[in-house]
Amino acid sequence: MDATVLLQQVVNGLSIGLVYALMAIGFTLIFGVLNVVNFAHGEVYTLGAFVGLIVITALKPPLWLVLVLVLASGALAGIVLERLAFRPFRRFRDEAALKSKAMREATLLSSLAVSIIVREALELKFSGEMQTIAQAYLLQRPIQLGPVTITDGNLIIFALSVAMLAALQFVLYRTRIGLAIRAVSNNVLGAQFVGIDTTRAIVATFVVGSMLGAVAGIMVGLYQGAIFPNMGFEPGVKAFVAMVMGGLSSIPGAVVCALILGVAESVATQFFSDGWKALVSYGFLLATLWFFPAGLFGFKREKM
Amino acid sequence: MSTDAALLELRQLTRRFGGLTAVDNVSAQVMSGELVGLIGPNGAGKTTLFNLISGVTPPTTGEIAFEGRRITGARPFEVARMGVGRTFQNLRIFPNMTVFDNVSVGAIGDIALGDALTWRGRARARSISEVSTEMLDKVGLAAFAGELAANLSYGKRKMLEIARALAGRPKLLILDEPAAGLNDTETADLARFIQRLRGEGLTILLVEHDMSLVMRVCSRVMVLAFGRKIADASPAAVQSDPAVLDAYLGTGDE
Amino acid sequence: MSARLNLVLVLALGALLAGLVALGSSYFHQIAITTMIFVILSASLNLITGSAGLLSLGHAAFFGVGAYAAALLSTRLGWPFWLTLPAAGAAAAAVGALVAVPTMRLTSIYFAVATLGIGEMIYVTMLNWVGFTRGPMGIRSIPGLELWGFKGIAFALVVTAGVMLAVLWLVHRLVHSYYGNAMRALREDDACADAMGIDVGRLKLQAFSVACALAGVAGALFAHTTGYISPESFKFGESILVLSMIVVGGLGSVYGSVIGAVILSVLPELLRELGSWRMIAVGAVLFLSILFLPRGLVGEVSAIELIRRQLRRRDRGDGGARRVAW
């Protein structure tokens, strides 16, 4: 196979991998703090894309403004989601109950239910088809870089992802709320004992995670030129796979695995038709669950 | 005390977790019909030793034999089916099942799918029902048979666990800190009950933190500290063993 | 629930079906058949998720495996339904066992996600292996249920009802036996069940295989009674629909499976005009159930049961009725 083609696929894969990484971080943050899987994370991604779309169609603002509005919508979605699908189940005060199987399953189902409602509502409003996006916004202008062609979309995704990761690092390690989040991830009761407002920390986690997800959504929407109600499902699954592969509580692990996943998927399109592409991620998921219960990087292991 | 009669035998058991040696070259025996205590300060390795015996963790080196048969590395359910019953320190009953059903789980063991559907299964079911009723009577919970296990008080839950363990008609019963959370009266009742069980021929290994219970009922006591067995003698001898006192209380100097 | 009550219900069902055949339109016939098929699906999922406590998010895939097996065997090899039904069950059980073996040591959430992944993989395979499954075009002209000259909608109703009753009997027996106790012990605390002598891995495998086999049989019925199948009927959304049925009806309860299936099959039909709201309604119902009725309507310790217990507090005499007789 041609080396340039391969390289091209790798570059594309890295781009999409970065998007998965942004989503995977959101998953990992929420999981770290609450020990639950947020099934509605994919819908936050979709919402971000749709909000961006609506904003573009209605107001035609510059791109940076679109992103700001999308970030805001993501934050709002995170707050609502936490309040609706997760908080009602935190009726207990002790650690064992908080992390109990029943709680995890209940929130999995409740977030699943919310995701269904959101997705179907979008489908109702926008009839499940791909939406048209004004040409000017599509991040598909090609740029030649030696043997490889990338689009301005790739560059923007890269720049934006790096910026957001840096911002995340800053928030987590240089702000008080970030400290609170890390404390709660580590030990909920301990954090409460030292006076940290755990509820606020949890909400903040959802806000941050959802903002990342929403931005990922609009970026992919513009990059691939396709925005449709079901678009969050697959990236959501892939982000989950990345999180599991990365060892569940490790953000760097999740990022690296998301990139691996993106590249693997991209390269796979050379060998399989598009339809089978999904098997790559699911295959990775199952392989990880079966062979690497501690994740590829074996960080802080949760009983699987 | 010939080795042939040993019901449970531990030979040079060692369990390492990375750099930590939780159980260090422990050898011991439990003879049929004995009531043996296993004590030691927190972190001594009692839980790990217990997990080794019951098959939850495999030993790094060493052997375990039950009734003369090697059970090293056997899985928990295999060990249970050979006749080892146990209770849990942190009380693991099945909260959403009735008391009766809880006990019956101890007797189900190797039930097969077909047992639910065939005539032969009916006979099996009858024997499970009988032993469950018998054990419920024995621990005095017969009146609560239809009650949800979640509704039982702490003390009754403990007895439920024992009934469940007994339902498997074990040859060896391992009790994991049964006196935890009980007051003096309840502990005395428990002691009497354990002695009654022993009188019926059951071999009992009592892992316990509470000295009074152990000293009261056990004919022999093993002491663990830092993963090693530091004493194995009668309660009186152990109580005055300087090494044991040192381990529990510590001396002022190095 | 006594045997007499069950008998009464079966007879009532018979009467209802007879009435349908005599008076109802084919629209009602189809609803009845679909509902009964969902009852089978619901009961089978309840076995694995309600009783054994293994949350499965890919049940529709096994439904599909059975449907495709029956469709292919009947259209390509001319097998009659009384052969395709068991074959479909066996095929689905085989796939289920294949799936179950490696996933056995995973606990709840991870098992759930693994089943999700597997469900998706099976769906993707159905969609893309065009040479075998005809992909999105689906398989058409699947022969209906026919035996010794009996055919048509009345016969289909009878056969479906018969299979449903057989399945319900089987599930009922398993749930109310000591085998059921073993499954519930698995659900409550699998490590403890292990320590009590239960071969946890084998039990999970068995329960899962049986549940998948029953789903496969449901799939075969679906294929024969609708005459056309395509991957669209076996997507993730369908798995969630069945899951919602048992959550609403009651986890671990055979009656709950029936009630949940009926509610979530009939309700969307009644709201036919609001057709696209079907899944939203399902999502909403699922959410509300989790929140307010965590054990479902008639689940093992449901809201209804709790009320009954309060009322029965007085006559504790014999310790209350034991649930297990066999």
Image (cartoon, coloured by chain):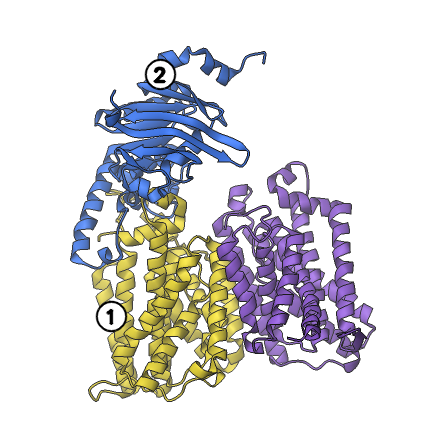
Chain colours: A purple, B blue, C yellow
Q: Residue at x 33, y 44 (%)?
A: B77
Relative to A81, is B27 on the left or the right? left
Which residue is at the front of the view, A195 or C83? C83
- Between circles 1 and 2, the one closer to the viewer is 2
Q: Position of residue A278 (x, y in %)?
A: 56, 71
Q: Is residue C49 at least partly visible in the picture?
A: no
Q: Residue at x 32, y 20 (%)?
A: B218
- Parent chain of label 2: B
Helix, strand, or loop for circle 2? strand
Helix, strand, or loop for circle 1? helix
Q: Which residue is mark 2?
A: B233
Q: Position of residue A205 (x, y in %)?
A: 67, 53
Quadrant, the N terminus of chain C: bottom left
Q: Which residue is mark 1?
A: C10
Number of the label disc, if any, that sits on residue B166? none
Does the residue at mark 1 contact the one at mark 2 (Cβ under 8 Å)? no
Above or below — where is C163 with respect to C184? Answer: below
Relative to C187, is A110 on the left or the right? right
Above or below — where is A205 with respect to C243? Answer: above
Relative to C271, is C183 on the left or the right? left
Where, by quadrant of the figure, is residue C133 drawn? bottom left
